[in-house]
Image (tube, grey):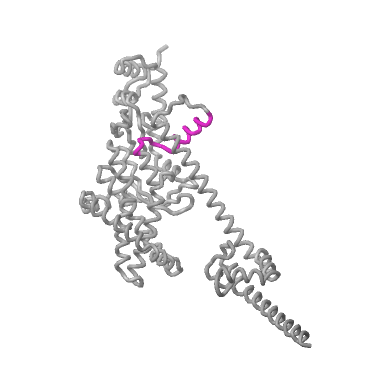
Amino acid sequence: MQENPPQNYRLRPGLEFSPQQHQGKSFVVVKDPVTARYFRFTETQALILESLRDPIDAASLAGRVSEKLGGQVPLKAIEGFLNSLEEKWLLDTPEILEKLLSVESHKLQDGSSILYRKIASFNPEKIFDWLLPRTRWAFTPAFHIFGALLILTGLTMSWLHRAEFAGAVQSLFSLHSLFVLWLVVFCVTTMHEFSHGLTCCHFGGNVKEVGFMLIYFQPAFYCDVSDSWMFPSKRDRMWVTFAGGYFQLIFWGLCTIIWRLTDPDTVINQIVLIVIVFAGLQTLVNFNPLIKLDGYYMLSDYLEIPNLRTKAMVSLWEWVSRKHSSRQFWKEDRAQLVYGAASIVFSTTLLIYVYSALYNWATTRYFCRTGRFCDVFNLHFETHGDGIHGRIARGSGSGGISKISQSGNCFGSGSDRFCRALGTEDSGGIQDRRAERTDGSKRDRRRDHRNARA
């Protein structure tokens, strides 16, 4: 009986390799251009990948790797590594080639999550090829100095004129300014994402996708700069992540100067004011490392820990359940433990705040709409109108309850409808009843005076 020949293995052609150093250790990042995925392998695994450039069976591969490492490598370990490569679609086999034919449908399924859904996208290579030669000046030291001066000037002006700025912001939230607000936010966000893409192309990467998506049911733009994983320099990878927020800070500083130099009633003043508010708030959110946005990826690159959040949660759970292999944490383990604890505290606090705000808003709006809650307060005011009116008048000046309804602080209630009801209906009734009590008191005093004289 003739035995079957051993199966030969080799890597798929077209894979790209990038040798890198992380925390003093050597790694190799492999890019799969077809599936647009990236994998990081250790130095030992890189030796196996190097031997898989040509077809070879598992036993011969184990012998060759053992010779390079100067030690015996078990055949089972080699077979397990080959199985992991096959699961990643990195081996050149008929089964994997058949799967690659349907890679577009797999990409569609990957983006069909309820909380993470891509709506539309396009290939921006031609746009970036046209823009890159015309924006070289943005990567020069002179521009960085100019940008730093703009940011410092904007911070100084915002602090010196913070009262005037706070008053001007209140005029933005009106119905007729919603379209202008949306248009400005769209333009600023587009420039933010293009800053990421241009920086990635500047350092030699490729950007294949820009588009729109829904993140937790909220519309958002995105620019796929995953090619920055192929950069050997950590500094270049961090610049790609920092570029979007950096551009917004420079633009924010420039708009702050224009806001101070222009008349408050002009259109340009209102536009730059929208940019100041939106760019400032978005930059603060983006640079928060506890949210999986720019700040998170910058911290991940700085610590040289890919998938930081996932690893942090695993380390924290192992530490809490006392399953950690050693009590002395290495640098990476300590960073993961601290980040995991901070992330849980932040997420829990944020959820409690959001749910509390939604509960207060919903209950206040429901009771006031049905009238039950408001009727209870109206009855209380009618019963104790004199005492309540006196305390309100002393606390708010002239006007009593009507004054408080205009300021929008109605005994802790966030409902304008509730405040208006108190200001128009109840205050008049309380004042009239107080006037009746005053007239009655005067009649009583006159009657007592006549009796005394008699």
Residue 194: x and y, percent? Answer: 31, 52
Residue lying at the far top of the rendered structure: 1
Above or below, 355 against 336 in this view is below
Q: Residue at x 30, y 31 (%)?
A: 21
Residue 173: x and y, percent? Answer: 45, 66
Viewport quadrant of the N terminus: top left
Specify whether residue 178 is in view. Answer: no
Q: Residue at x 40, y 62 (%)?
A: 182
As for residue 51 lying within the magenta part, the answer is no
As for residue 303 lying within the magenta part, the answer is yes
Q: Nearer the viewer, residue 394 or 374?
A: 394
Q: Residue at x 37, y 56 (%)?
A: 280
Q: How many marks?
A: 0
Residue lying at the far front of the rendered structure: 453
Q: Residue at x 37, y 46 (%)?
A: 294
192 lies left or right of 403: left
Quarter of the image for residue 239 reads top left
* Secondary structure, magenta segment, majority class: helix
Q: Nearer the viewer, residue 230 or 123?
A: 230
Residue 431: x and y, percent? Answer: 64, 77
Above or below, 83 against 171 in this view is above
Residue 363: x and y, percent? Answer: 61, 58
For the record, the magenta segment spans 301-321
Quarter of the image for residue 308 reads top left
Quarter of the image for residue 405 reads bottom right
380 lies left or right of 185: right
Specify whether residue 399 is in view. Answer: yes
